[in-house]
Image: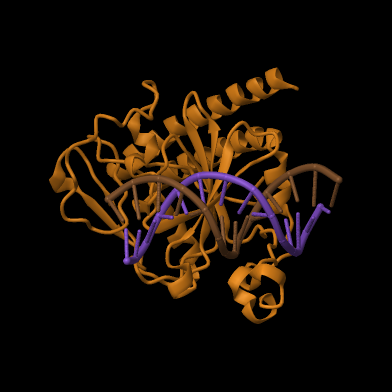
Chain colours: A orange, B purple, C brown
Amino acid sequence: MEASSFGHRKVKAMKELVRGQDLAKRLQKSISRGGSPSSAEDDAQELVASFTKALSVLSHSESDDGSQVSDGQNDPAARSEGSSEESSKRKDGRGRYKRRRPSDTWSKISPTLVDDGHAWRKYGQKSILNTDFPRSYYRCTHKVEQKCPATKQVQMISKDPLMYQSTYYGRHTCKNLLNSPQIIVEHEDEDSKKLVSFSGNAASSQNNAFFSSLSFGLIKEEPRQETVPGGDHALFRSQPLPPPPPPPPSDCNFLPEYWPREVDQLDDFMPFGSY
DNA sequence: TTGATTTGACCACC
DNA sequence: GGTGGTCAAATCAA
């Protein structure tokens, strides 16, 4: 159908993303140099606006997503295993697949499938209307043992350049991995690592989720796509891993050449509802 | 053998 | 009725 229209929107979105990338780099430099907080904040605001715009453009062609997150009816806490007693009545042990509500959801766009500090298990994949690529569904590996409600969806939104949109739902309650994610901003010289620690306090759990979403983790399905330290770019880690596995895999060809590697760690973060 | 992924089917929401 | 989200059996991989 309106393929050319979609292409146009894609180009527009890409422009915004590239701009966002530029802003992210500025922000990164600003942070690493201890620049003025106000200019960093300005950059951050612009960055958010840029990605918001890009997402908005993209979501126009994926209007399902927008409508999906804009409904606030359901109760994720009660969905799936949560209401086990009632669910036992349903036939075949299935049912009660409620749609998600917008709270506790956020998304990011990245040229790679960035790990986020948690182990995910893929439980489904579906073709979504008006999208070129299927959407993958992940849940926390510890969903069963620790009743961790966190899930995420990953969808490729563009193949050239490769862009993924990861949407996170719910917060991790599992204790397997760090509750106090730490971010290491690594610079050219190892000695100048900056460590930012976020104490795991519930009030800022959204922030924790944010930062953990920026950090490394495990996605069982795509082990090759873990981002690796690639030089002088900022490196976000979920925990102070002692040995950074040095050899940057040469098969890491997911990034288009013109896409600097910084950005694959500096993913944007965008709570739903802002657009 | 065990754990993860794939895939078809089921179910709720719009 | 169409669509998105989830389940679970079958299959695959380590």
Of A221 and A268, nearer the camera is A221
The N terminus of chain A is located in which quarter?
Answer: top right
Q: Quadrant of residue A157?
A: top right
Which residue is painted at 42% across and 70% down in the image?
A174
Which residue is painted at 55% across and 38% down in the image?
A51
In the displayed structure, would residue A74 be above or below residue A223?
below
Relative to residue A150, is residue A176 drawn left or right? left
Of A138 and B14, nearer the camera is A138
Q: Position of residue A210 (x, y in %)?
A: 46, 55
Relative to residue A184, is residue A174 drawn left or right? right
Q: Position of residue B1 (x, y in %)?
A: 32, 66
The C terminus of chain A is located in which quarter?
Answer: top right
Which residue is painted at 50% across and 38% down in the image?
A164
Relative to residue A151, is residue C2 drawn left or right? right
Relative to residue A140, is residue A239 drawn left or right? left
In the displayed structure, would residue C7 be above or below residue A114?
below
In the displayed structure, would residue A138 be above or below residue A8?
below
